[in-house]
Amino acid sequence: MVPDSGIPVGRSLAGALTVLGAVGGLNLGASAVGDHRASSPTDATTTPTALASAQVADPTYRPGPDAHPRNTPEGEARAVPQLPVPRAPAEDPDRRGEHPAGSSGEMAQARPGACVAPAGLTSLIDQDPTDEQLPWKRTGAGKVTIYFAAGGISPEWRSDMEYGAAQWNKSPCLDTHVVDTCPPGANCVTVSVVDKGDDGNFDAVEENGYTTGGHIDYLDTLSTGQKKNVAVHEMGHAVGLKHRKTKHVLMNGDTYDDVFDPDATEYQNLLYDYGRQLSASTRTSTTKASHRRNDSSGPGANNP
């Protein structure tokens, strides 16, 4: 039996290591090897809001100016996934059509260049719950064609709208055109420019849960940057998009002078709205929609 020295085993071992180190000329100190501090980052997530209740409209009635709030009462915007814009391979072969995660937390995937709702995308993303807007109805697997009758507006506004049409046409679901007058029987949005009122306003005509027409008013006293922002924004409403909660993005409720392009979330919402129509049940609408664009972002506001 080994006599009990009264010294803890761990301390005896440490002493032995010290002695061996001294003999061999080694430094066998007590410092820990591979000592790492754990980290537990959290991911900012956005719970997608459900598509608002559908709307009923008399197709012969021009909706009144029911203003929608541009800002949410919740204050700061939540972070939302910013992912590559889905494009057809011929336009951008490096874009893989990645989509935000659905309720399962998995990446939703869709075939690049196809107007198909990704399997993992189960609702619209980053939506202002106070806003209402419906998409147009698809009549087949192709794109939805929408004309903007802009024959009576200035070249500056028309140029901004043509820029907007090019941006919205990056969606595989849309084929938009800025024209003097709409072809007979086509999906048509009329356009005018006014010298007072809101920065921009889209009045939708809706029937059986879908947009069937509408009218855009643009305020002519805006700055050059604001005009371009409002032009593309109101066209976004006209193709079926609601306001978003996130600040400083195109479909947010404020007017900006430096935001002109849709982001990945807006293209994702178009995929959801149009891509699922081929398998979705008939919509039921309950209200008419009107979208007023007010500049509440700082100096240079042009409100009534």
Image: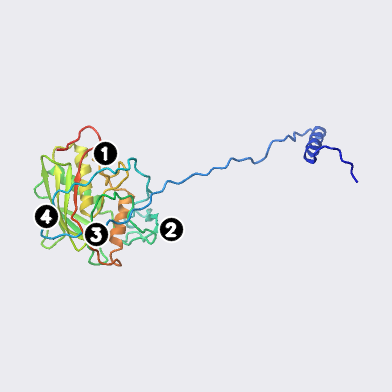
- Res. 54 mark: 3
Q: Which of the 4 image quarters holds residue 87? A: bottom left
- Near mark 1 (Cα within 10 A), the count class, few <14, some 14-19 or many ≥20, is some
Q: Amino acid at mark 1?
A: Asp
**Secondary-structure class at tag 4:** loop
Q: Amino acid at mark 4?
A: Arg
Residue 17 vertical position relative to residue 291 in the rendered view, above or below: above
Q: Residue at x 12, y 63 (%)?
A: 185
The reply to whether residue 298 is in sight is yes
Q: Mark 2 or 1, which is nearer the eye?
A: 2
Q: Amino acid at mark 3?
A: Ala
Q: How far, Cα to Cα, is label 4 from label 1?
A: 32 Å
Q: How far, Cα to Cα, is label 2 from label 1?
A: 35 Å
Q: Earlier in the sequence, mark 2 or mark 4?
A: 4
Q: Earlier in the sequence, mark 4 or mark 3?
A: 3
In percent of width and height, residue 112 lies at 35, 59
- Near mark 4 (Cα within 10 A), the count class, few <14, some 14-19 or many ≥20, is some
Q: Earlier in the sequence, mark 2 or mark 1?
A: 2
Q: Earlier in the sequence, mark 4 or mark 1?
A: 4
Q: Mark 4 or 1, which is nearer the eye?
A: 4
Q: Earlier in the sequence, mark 3 or mark 1?
A: 3
- Near mark 3 (Cα within 10 A), the count class, few <14, some 14-19 or many ≥20, is some
Q: Please name the residue that numbered disc 1 is placed on.
A: 258
Residue 139 vertical position relative to residue 125 in the rendered view, above or below: below
Q: Please name the residue that numbered disc 4 is placed on.
A: 62
Q: How many marks?
A: 4
Q: How far, Cα to Cα, is label 2 from label 4?
A: 41 Å
**Secondary-structure class at tag 1:** loop
Q: Please name the residue that numbered disc 2 is placed on.
A: 104
